[in-house]
Image: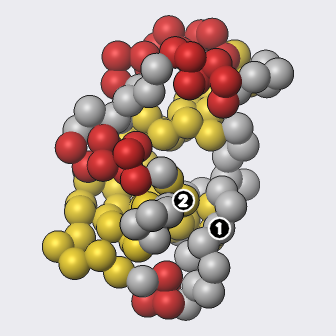
Amino acid sequence: MNVLLSIKPEFANKIFNGTKKYEFRKSIFKKDVKKVIVYASSPVQRVIGEFDIIGILCKDTESLWHETKKYSGITKDFYDEYFANKEMAYAIKVGTVRKYSCPKYLSDFDIEYAPQSFAYL
């Protein structure tokens, strides 16, 4: 199964250039997901590529940061703000990435609106 994830363009670009190898989430999928389709949110508002999931980490926020910080693609301040008041955090480990040569529209995936977090495909 695949999911469409909404990701800020700054972070999506870091995933595709290899400097961000973890995508952080406050909650995670309930189904077995193998691939992420990346929707770059505003101002891009296009599906720009995809990546394989090679694992999902679930740890307390400090342990997760310690393990992932080198390839987090974000600052510690941003991380702390994102996970404020959370005890546990998730990190999707980015595998093989494929950036589309021509960005796609949500309608190409039969989706009308960008998901707040993610949508199963």
**Relative to residue 73, is residue 84 drawn left or right?**
right
Asked which colour scheme the image uses, the reply is secondary structure
Residue at (40, 43) in percent of width and height? 11
Instruction: Residue type at mark 1: give it.
Output: Pro
**Relative to residue 106, is residue 62 drawn left or right?**
right
- The tag earlier along the polypeptide, 2 or 1, is 2
Residue 34 in sight in this render: no
Q: Are marks 2 and 1 in contact (CB under 8 Å)?
A: yes
Q: Quadrant of residue 21?
A: top left
Residue extending farthest to the front is 43
Residue 4 in sight in this render: yes
Task: Residue under label 2, please give it.
Answer: 6
Check disc 2 and report its element: helix, strand or loop: strand
Task: Give the Cα distance between marks 2 and 1.
Answer: 6 Å
Check disc 1 and report its element: helix, strand or loop: loop
Coordinates of residue 40 in the picture (x, y in percent)? 43, 61
Residue extending farthest to the right is 85
Asked whether 81 or 63 is in front, the reply is 81
Coordinates of residue 29 in the picture (x, y in percent)? 67, 53
Coordinates of residue 97 in the picture (x, y in percent)? 26, 53
Coordinates of residue 75 in the picture (x, y in percent)? 46, 20
Q: Quadrant of residue 3?
A: bottom right
Q: Quadrant of residue 90?
A: top right
Q: State whether residue 30 is above or below residue 3.
A: above
Task: Residue under label 1, please give it.
Answer: 115
Q: State whether residue 80 is above or below residue 35.
A: above
Q: Which mark is residue 65?
A: none
Query: Is the residue marked by circle 2 packed among few (<14), some (14-19), or many (20+) residues within 10 Å?
Result: many
| Quarter that holds the C terminus | bottom right
Residue at (43, 16) in percent of width and height? 69
Instruction: Residue type at mark 2: give it.
Output: Ser
Residue at (56, 25) in percent of width and height? 78
